[in-house]
Image (tube, grey):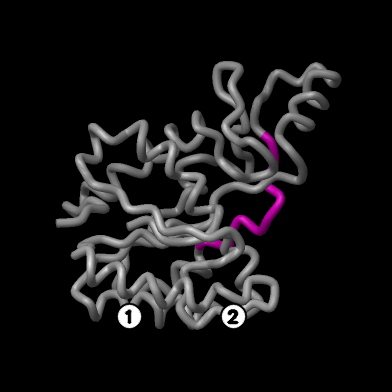
Amino acid sequence: MLWGDSFAAHYVPGLDANINQLRANIVEYTYAGCPPILSYFSYGRPDCMRFNQQALKIIQDAGIKTVVLSGRWTDYEARSFDSLQQTIDTVRGLGVRVFVIGQSPQFITDVRKIAFFAKRENLDDTSWPMAMDPDINNRVRAFTKGATFIDPLNFLCSAGRCSYADAGQFLYFDYGHLSTIGATLAISKYWPAFATDDAVATTE
C-alpha cells in the first residue's frame, strides 16, 4: 500500500509503468496535504486524522504485507518527526514491512519557467539547484527505525542540483510533483532498494 499525501500520489503513474518489474498489487491510499502520520491534525484538513486511522483497518482487512510511506516532509518538520516513528512502530506491530520514501526534489518555481529562463540564457544544462535543505532526508531518516529508507535525492540529484527534464520531456509538472515520465524514472531507480530487501508493495 502506498500511503501519504500528493507527494505519494505522484508515484502512482511510475508504479503503473513499472508494474511488470514490481510484480505486485498496488493499493493507493493518498490524500493531498495529509501526511502518513497517524497523529497528524490540521484545521485545513480536518478529515486527515480519520483518514489515516482508516489506513490501519485497510491494512488489516486487505491483508497488506508491505506499506510505503511518502510525503512532502519539508512541510511537516516543524512538528517534529517523532510521530512518524510512532506510525512506523504501529504499522510494524501489525506484522507489516515498512518503507519510507524521503523528500523528493523541489524547485524554486515551476520547471517550465526554469526551462524558459535556461533557454533565454542559453544554458544547456537541464539541472537546477533544489529549493530546500539538502540535508532534510538525513533528518527524516533518523525517525524511521525499523523501516527501509529510500532517499530520492541520492537517485535524482547530484551536488545539490537535480535534473528537471530528460530528452526534452519534463520530469515534474510543477515545482516538485513528478510527471508520469519523472515518476517512471524515479520508481525504476528506487526499485533495487525495494528488491534488495526482498519485498514488494503487495497484498495477499
Residue visible at 20% across and 53% down? 199
Which of discs 1 and 2 lies nearer the camera? The answer is 2
Give the crowd class for mark 2: few <14, some 14-19, many >=20 residues within 10 Å: some
Disc ID at residue 113? none
Decide whether residue 63 is among the magenta residues: no
Residue 167 x/y as whole percent = 55, 17
Quadrant, the C terminus: bottom left
Could you say where residue 32 lies in the image, as x and y percent from the top left? 58, 58
Expressed as whole percent of the image width and height from the top left, the position of residue 69 reads 41, 62
User: Which residue range is magenta in the image?
Assistant: 128-137
Q: Decide: is 135 above or below 81.
A: above
Q: Along the line of sight, which residue is nearer the eye, 192 or 183?
A: 183
Amino acid at dot 1: Asp
Determine whether the residue tagged by mark 1 lies in a helix, strand or loop.
helix
Mark 1, residue position = 89
Looking at the image, which is closer to me, 165 or 6? 6
* Horizontal relation, residue 16 to residue 65: left or right: right
- Quarter-of-image position of residue 65: bottom left
Q: Please tell me which of labels 1 and 2 falls first in the chain.
A: 2
Q: Main secondary structure of the magenta part?
A: loop
The residue singled out by tag 2 in the image is 41
Mark 1 burial class by Cα count in 10 Å: few <14, some 14-19, many 20+: some
How far apart in space, not on screen, are marks 1 and 2 (Cα)? 19 Å
Secondary-structure class at tag 2: loop
Residue 131 within the segment the image draws in magenta:
yes
